[in-house]
Amino acid sequence: METSRGFLPADGKLDSLRQETRGGGKGKDAGDDGRRYKPPQGERDRPHESEQSGEEESLTSAIAVILVKFVVMGPFCIPHEALDDNLHHQGHFAGAPYLGHPGYGSVVYDPDQDPSAMGRTYFGVGGVEWSHDRGSVSRTGARLRLEGPYRFGIEARGSYLREHLARGGTDEVGVVVADLLYRFAQGEHAQFRAGAGCRALLDRGWSTAGVDFVYGLELFPAKPYAVSLSIAGGTLGSTTVVEPRATLGAVFRAWEVDVGYAGLRIGHVDLGGPVVELRRWY
């Protein structure tokens, strides 16, 4: 079977995934014999026409440093400043979004004015979901996040992937992820988190592992709406993983129903698709 990405094995996407994580999907570029390119003699002897002066190079370096700081630190500093957050405040949360509160969180808890439920510093959310790619692979998943004082938390998520093969029968693998999170920006209507951890592919007695990095935000703009955006990525065996996600949901008491898109690209194998999720806040 030929696709725009090349040839997939006859056994299907999940078999191609195995080859990617074990290094079977890698190959040398044509003409790459490992030798270093050497320009012709005349080109080596000729001064580079675009050579800059020392002052120009210093200015270029300064601009590059500013751009790098903006790109690297911007996603963390901008939300923190926009929410007028203070890292010395650990945050307090309701039993669920919009449950006795216009949003979900409170930076400072006042026991004389705020509901007693807003005094919680331990909280979490768990959910189950179902997704399907554009082909024959379905994905059933579950997620659980627990958070406590000082903004730290842990999140575990897993996916069971099942494929109906063209030659008959089915194929299946599992992917599990565990991350340590830090809530670096928070407010009544928004929380931003980032973290790192590990992921693993479980496959009939054989498994491979890698690292994971995640950046995400949850918005509670007005009752009953909830918006969740995240991007995760890392490695799995000898290949890379990219996992973008975007959902829009509605909260009813402590329950939330979401619809959106859940991406999962492992090497050259694209397993992303629309997703439906049911979450429970506690």
Image (tube, rainbow, N blue to C red):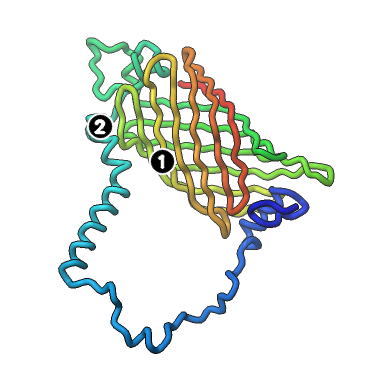
Q: In terms of sequence position, does the residue under pointer 2 or pointer 1 come before the other?
A: 2
Q: State the image coordinates of residue 122 (x, y, percent, origin top left).
A: 38, 26
In depth, the one of 168 and 129 nearer the eye is: 168
Q: Which amino acid is tagged 1?
A: Tyr
Q: Quadrant of residue 29?
A: bottom right
Which of 119 and 232 lies nearest the eye of the viewer?
A: 232
Q: Is residue 176 left or right of residue 111?
A: right
Q: Which of the 4 image quadrants contains residue 116?
A: top left
Label 1 sits on a secondary structure element that is strand
- Furthest toward the left, the residue is 55
Residue at 52% across, 43% down: 243
Q: Amino acid at mark 2?
A: Ala
Q: Residue at x 47, y 21 (%)?
A: 281
Residue at (30% x, 78% y) in the render: 48
In x, y percent, where is residue 237? Answer: 57, 57
Q: Mark 2 falls on what kind of element?
A: helix
Residue sitting nearer the eye, 15 or 156: 15
Q: Residue 47, percent across and down?
A: 29, 82
Residue matched to label 2: 82
Residue 131 - label: none
Residue 208 on image: x %, y %: 60, 54
How far apart marks 2 and 1 lie (CA) works out to 17 Å
Near mark 1 (Cα within 10 A), the count class, few <14, some 14-19 or many ≥20, is some
Q: For the point 44% across and 43% down, which residue is it?
A: 214
Would you place residue 123 above or below residue 112 in this image? below
Callout 2 crowding tier (Cα within 10 Å): few <14, some 14–19, many ≥20: few
Which residue is disc 1 drawn over? 215
- Side of 72 where 57 appears, left or right: left
